[in-house]
Amino acid sequence: MDRPAGADGFADLLQELRVRSGRSYEDLARATFTSRSTLHRYCTGAGLPVDDDVVLRLGEACGADAGELDDLVRRWKTALADRESGAVRPVPADVEPEEPAAAPVESEGAEADGPAPRRSRRRAVMAAAGLAVVVLAGAVVVAVRGGDAPASAGPTGAAGEDVCVNRSDVRRADGPTGAFDATWTADQLCPNQPNVPVFLTPLAREDDPGAQAGTLYSTESWFVCWTTGRLHSGGNRIWYYTQGDVSHPDHRDRRAWGFVAAHYLDTVLDPDPGTPQCPALRGRS
């Protein structure tokens, strides 16, 4: 796998700011509504945010001054330009940097600021032979309007073991513009494919981009419920409800809430046994 040649400049500065701030990956992820694994990709040059709102949010959370924020955005733009021009280099083995030895310890009060922790995603550690061992970690919510770019073919589990992890310390609400206008106090964290389309309705055709509510970039994603809908290319009618990382420009009011066809998730069974069934749709697309 290759990455933009300029990604290191952005990654180096972001990692420098993070270490200087004393924030751990998990703490910074919580503070910026980013997943821990996605943040790690940013800090190692293996991934790039999708827009400057995410870049600025990361820099500000690390205490960057105006000049450093400008530099961070400039380096991010350079990396994006390299990606678009095809200037890439090989990605080294995904070895996570150690946390700073003398990093200050954040108080519980500091982590509790803002809404309940958000979408976190599991950290996938891939062996060279292609066998995946999954370590599920951290919890953070997904930010809409830009979101993080917010990861893997995914594991299959052993002897039918469920690879998803249930979380009961969250609060998810799709609001009056969502499909249900409901609130969930638990979710299911599952591995999924990258760049997944999120549709307004489970009855959508997968070849209809106009029916998309948004896109899910991360490959460790939370889902609050499942429902049945149109037969999709995975061969069944199961769709999972979640919030994407970015909204479709024609449906920003939906805040990227929508349905993902089951074949994009690396679940052992569909519907996933730990994911509850969705309530009745409100009769809107």
Image: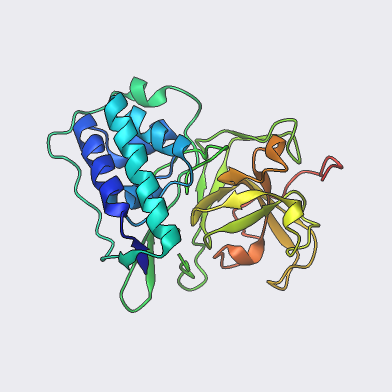
Q: Position of residue 210 (x, y in %)?
A: 76, 53
The one nearer the camera, 94 or 226, is 94
Q: Is residue 105 above or below residue 129?
A: above
Residue 52 visible somewhere in the drawing: yes
Q: Position of residue 199 (x, y in %)?
A: 71, 52
Apparent side of residue 22 relative to residue 208 in the rendered image (left or right): left
Apparent side of residue 10 relative to residue 256 in the rendered image (left or right): left
Q: Is residue 1 above or below residue 78?
A: below
Tally of numbered tags: 0
Single out the residue that lies furthest toward the bottom.
Answer: 129
Apparent side of residue 162 relative to residue 233 in the rendered image (left or right): left
The one nearer the camera, 226 or 18, is 18
Q: Residue at x 30, y 46 (%)?
A: 10
Q: Position of residue 73 (x, y in %)?
A: 37, 38
The one nearer the camera, 20 or 274, is 20
Residue 136 visible somewhere in the drawing: no
Figure colour scheme = rainbow
Q: Residue at x 47, y 23 (%)?
A: 114
Q: Residue at x 35, y 20 (%)?
A: 109
Single out the residue that lies furthest toward the left.
Answer: 102
For the N terminus, the quadrant is bottom left
Apparent side of residue 115 relative to residue 270 in the rendered image (left or right): left
Q: Position of residue 248 (x, y in %)?
A: 66, 46
